[in-house]
Amino acid sequence: MKTQSGAIERLEQSGVKPSMQRIAIMGYLMDNLTHPTADNVFNGLSSSIPTLSKTTVYNTLKLLARQGAILELTIDDKNVRYDANIFLHAHFRCKLCGSVYDLPVGSFKAMTVKAIDGFTITERQLYYKGYCKRCSAKAEKNGA
């Protein structure tokens, strides 16, 4: 299984000891590039791993984000979302349907911030919000 071997490799590269649950969660994120929430991950895996708990999912996602294996997105006002794409890119969230999309960044230099005396930058995220292709007409019709 290609995803499983990719998940194991990502875990090991990030210094995370692979376990059945960690491999499954990492694999789920790599297969579902929809920026799922922890509940989405749990619901997507619970039927194939009946012993999986929500606590395990939450703790594993926090660990993976802390180790740099995944991105933790706070673009959604209500839920933290997770992204297996760890390469520099921006995100767009539709204000109507709530979907989150990856956006390529035109210039990496444009995303570089000069060091600020005494500050240490530990992460960077670029978010856009608006209406996706599917929702733009609906939003216009409703005067949004």
Image (spheres, grey):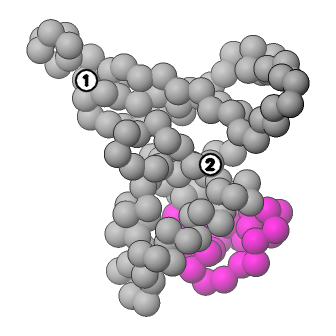
Q: Image quadrant of residue 140?
A: top left
Magenta residues span 3-28
Left or right: where does residue 42 sit relative to residue 97?
right
Magenta part, dominant SS: helix
Q: Image quadrant of residue 76?
A: top left
Residue 141 shown in magenta: no
Element type at marker 1?
helix
Q: Position of residue 85 (x, y in %)?
A: 64, 45
Label 1 environment density (alpha carbons within 10 Å; few <14, some 14–19, many ≥20): some
Residue for badge 2: 71
- Residue 87 visible from this viewpoint: no
Residue for badge 1: 135
- Residue at horizontal 25 percent and vertical 29 percent from the top: 96
Q: Can you tell which of label 2 and label 1 is closer to the viewer?
A: 2
39 over 128 or under it: above or below: below
Q: Earlier in the sequence, mark 2 or mark 1?
A: 2
- Residue at horizontal 44 percent and vertical 62 percent from the top: 38
75 over 41 or under it: above or below: above
Type of the residue with mark 2: Leu
Left or right: where does residue 38 sit relative to residue 82?
left
